[in-house]
Amino acid sequence: MVQSWVESGQSLRKFSKEQGISISTLYDWKSKYGVQQPGESVLPKSSNPDNWTSEQKFAVVVETATLSEAELSEYCRSKGIYPEQVKEWKSACIGSNQTTAQRKQQQLAERKADKKRIRQLEKELKRKEAALAETAALLVLRKKLNAYWGEDEDS
């Protein structure tokens, strides 16, 4: 029904009178079934792009595929999104079209990089723990030495 209203090009009031359906019911159906009028943007009126569907995000990626950086920035300002979000969505679209072998290879490379980073962090942690233990031992020795000589810690 909503699709026929959109295709008829009639005003909502006129179409609802002809069909005997209330205007509010037609609006509800339109929002529920996502039917668009010709020339209407695929993008939602919601200002939060995190709530957009994958189809809407893909539409943005397609629309911005041929734009330069300046044009992309202008487009993003007009839609209320960030260029980084568009780039993230583009990489997600590309990633979803990879073959299983490509995904496995990419995951393997990521795991290898993660393991290397973990080794570096563990090595750094051991070094810091040793330095902390040495500092604690020096403080204890200094306190014992001060107690032996009867000196105040602040002097």
Image (cartoon, rainbow, N blue to C red):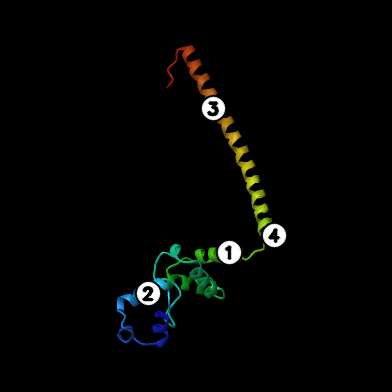
In the picture of the structure, the residue carrying the numbered disc 2 is 29
- State the CA–CA distance, disc 2 to disc 4: 43 Å
At a point 45% along the width and 12% down the height, the residue shown is 150
- State the CA–CA distance, disc 3 to disc 4: 51 Å
Q: Position of residue 122 (x, y in %)?
A: 61, 38
Circles 1 and 4: CB distance less than 8 Å? Answer: no
Q: Amino acid at mark 4?
A: Ala
- State the CA–CA distance, disc 3 to disc 2: 71 Å
In the picture of the structure, the residue carrying the numbered disc 1 is 91
At label 1, counting other C-alpha atoms closer than 10 Å, the crowd grade (few under 14, some 14-19, many 20 or more) is few
At label 2, counting other C-alpha atoms closer than 10 Å, the crowd grade (few under 14, some 14-19, many 20 or more) is some
Circles 2 and 4: CB distance less than 8 Å? Answer: no
The mark nearer the N terminus, 3 or 4, is 4
The mark nearer the N terminus, 1 or 4, is 1
Q: Amino acid at mark 2?
A: Trp
Q: Position of residue 17 (x, y in %)?
A: 30, 85
